[in-house]
Image (cartoon, rainbow, N blue to C red):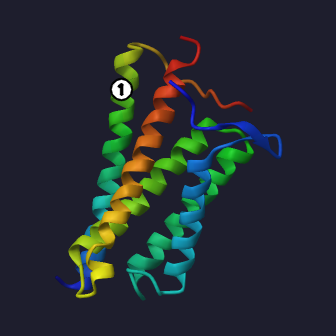
Amino acid sequence: MDPALAQAVSLVASGVFMVLAAVAAYINSRAKHPGKVEEDDDDE
Amino acid sequence: MPRLDLPVQFLRRPVKPLAFAAMWTMFVIGYINFRDIGLFKNSVSGDILAAFSVAAGVALLAGWWRRSQTMAEVGLLMASGVWFARMMLALLLPGTNPSTQYGWLFSGAWVIALLGAFLLERDDRDNWGH
């Protein structure tokens, strides 16, 4: 495979991976607390 | 579920070994790719990955310093993405050297650890006050 293409594919796949992980976390959160509004619960 | 920090403090902040290790790897990957000596070699993709790595490291550092759960989660997710990109490239361009042919396995371990840490942190946040 062409190195430039492989690098681009790797970056795009990484982006898809991160989106899927964030969606999975969001779905898990919604399943545990249906209807709850996301809050900024930082310590500071 | 236990949180991912030790029951000791450094600079009056909780010690998070996995997040510290992840931050370390992000700055190392950023440095290596900015110097064009990493898997991505001298390429625009390598520079993008380097910038993203440093951003992930800064997010983890900021999350720890500001005690920000959100920043810590963002940093862990970004760090898992950086390792995923590295794993993908190692799989697509295995090379002929055994150290590069099997390098994706190490990257895969980091992906599992950091994705798991991100999901645990998110799950832990959901448990607060419940």
Q: Residue at x 38, y 40 (%)?
A: A22
Which residue was labeled with disc 1?
A28
B94 to B85, vertically: above or below: below
Task: Residue A16: give x, y in percent of width and height.
Answer: 29, 53
Residue A11 shows in the view = no
Residue type indicated by callout 1? Asn
Q: Nearer the viewer, residue B59 or B19?
A: B19
Secondary structure of the residue carrying tag 1 is helix
B46 to B73, vertically: above or below: below
Q: Which of the 4 image quadrants contains residue B129?
A: top right
In this rendering, would B106 be left or right of B102? right
Q: Residue at x 20, y 85 (%)?
A: A2
Count of marks overlaid on the render:
1
Q: Which of the 4 image quadrants contains residue B12?
A: top right
A44 to B45, vertically: above or below: above
In this rendering, would B59 be left or right of B99? right
Callout 1: chain: A
